[in-house]
Amino acid sequence: MDAALVELAGAYGVATSYWDWQGRLVHVDPDVVVAVLGVLGVDATRPKTALKEIPDRPRTLVTTDGEPGWYERPDGTTVIVTPDRLPEPARTWGWMLQLYALRSAASWGAGDFADLARFAEWAAETGAGALLLNPLHAVPPIRPVPASPYSPSSRRYVNPLYLRVEDTSAYRLADPDTRAAVDRLRPPADTDLIDYDAVWDAKRQALELLWRTENPRPSDDGFATYCALAELHGADWRRWPAELHRPDGPGVARARAAAADRVAFHAWLQRLCDEQLAAAAKAAAGMQIGIVHDLAVGIDPGGADGWMLQDVLAQGIRIGAPPDAFNQLGQDWGLAAWRPDRLAATGYRAYRDLLAASLRHGGGLRVDHVAGLWRLWWIPPGGSPDQGTYVRYDGPAMLGALIAEAHRAGAVVIGEDLGTVLPEVRQAMSERQVLGSAVLWFTRRWEEPGQPFLPPAEWPRLALASISTHDLPTVPGFLTDEHVRVRAQLGILGRTVAEELAVAEADRAALRDLLAAEGLAGEAPVPALHMLLARTPCRLVMASPYDALGEVRQPNLPGTVDGYPNWRIPLPVPLDELIGDERMLAIARILARRS
């Protein structure tokens, strides 16, 4: 690669080479580097000239000297004052919940905020200290309703699909005929899979009936405006009429005025979400940590945040991951990325607002793909996922902002740091007392023959420990080869079925060896594995109701779209029965003994 292009790329944080998952140095195609620099506004076809034209860039200073907060110096420098570290999280345990799966008899086809509050009250009574939720980020208000909580339209607003209609003041104050009409709309809550379209259709119609009794408040809220325009023109703002592409343009002002009632309606839905989330957080107030929200790594570029925040996003870029053993062509997540230079130039305002919104009603925040605060794999426009490169962010500033906002909220921070992560990431997390992630399936001595599982006493202290995650097999699925069977059926195995079954059996044998070494060989598998978790020094231990209740299907199967019911699998037992289920109570007793 041309030396001037290498120097130019380095000045803008664009990698010209990287170490892959096998420890090999990979050189990035120069055309990819030029394309990525082009997205950053740099004409890299003439790198020597471009080197002479690098503008002065705004500075960001992160310091622990002073009262925690944000400041802007007259010279344009953004100063983020943080505590030296966050307080050490309480040593406690809790549950990992897919909220949509937590259905009760009163649910409208999917778990909701009232179900969350009820579960939180029960969990607190059993001694649980935290509840980790799937992302509750907003999606477009039209069909088809996206199932994945990790491809949101907005990370700053909440999905009203989780509203409990009957818990609104509008329902309580409605006349009998209106309430009867609303009640008739309730869909069944016992379907085999979550039908998001049916749930949202029913709730939207019910809320529209109740909206007629409200006194509309005029609103110029950007998200509510997006929702109203999406109902008219579709979910992807990039396909809207040109005069609507800029949220601050005169065309949008006219469209907002013409759709004032719908704008006010969607703003009202967000106020209801805020009220009901606050009620759920209050129900969890007896816990040591409380509700832990999940922050997705990115957004749908055509969604609400893509429209409202387009000036600080890298237009045309999609983020993903480079090739590895499981995805030999790399991964394209289809999500938008912050543009690091624009983020710094605006004093990280959009990022700060996102963090504040995420921490508003919770005692903790899990940051998905926390390594993305330091670097992200960018795929340039028209490129394939293996033809991308890493782009660096100001890691100290991104982490500093997170620490500052968590300190303000009195919240715990958990970073999802599974897989290949730069050493500086884990070092900084440890220094700031941000919890990492320790998952049983991956906590092994990979360099030793047979790759034995690590004894629980050797697990990291500053971590959230769990048996599995939403992207991995449940315990019942792992024990019955469900994860092999379903991938074979869908044609996404990386090896032959026989080879995969052999690997699965070897994993189970290694697990049996660990249980025997810990004196747990005589215990039933699900309780025994939770006993292992209870013996770790990890500050936070999490259990999944899917494991406790015997569900063999995992919530999400990476590498699939329509072939597997991702994010649509309800818990096999309704909430009304779950809170008295002996299998759930047994896990609670095991984990409560460690506190």
Image (cartoon, rainbow, N blue to C red):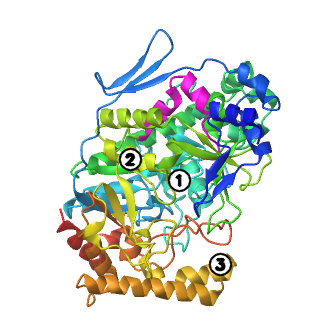
- How far apart marks 2 and 1 lie (CA) works out to 57 Å
Nearer the observer, 253 or 94: 94
Q: Is residue 345 magenta?
A: yes
Q: Where is residue 229 in the image (x, y as percent from the top left)?
A: 69, 35
User: Which of pointers 2 and 3 lies earlier in the amino acid sequence?
Assistant: 2
**Proximity of marks 1 and 3: CB atoms separated by less than 8 Å:** no
* The residue stretch that appears in magenta: 332-358
Q: Where is residue 170 in the image (x, y as percent from the top left)?
A: 44, 41
One can see residue 439 in this view: yes
**Which is more foreground, mark 1 or mark 3?**
3
Residue occupied by mark 1: 181
Q: How crowded is mark 3: few (under 14 residues within 10 Å), some or many (20 or more)?
A: some
- How far apart marks 1 and 3 lie (CA) works out to 49 Å
Q: Residues within 10 Å of mark 1 (few under 14, many from 20)?
A: some
Nearer the observer, 90 or 584: 90
**Which is more foreground, mark 2 or mark 3?**
2
Residue at the outermost front position: 3
Three-letter code, disc 1: Ala
Q: In this view, does 39 lie above or below 324?
A: above
Residue occupied by mark 2: 427
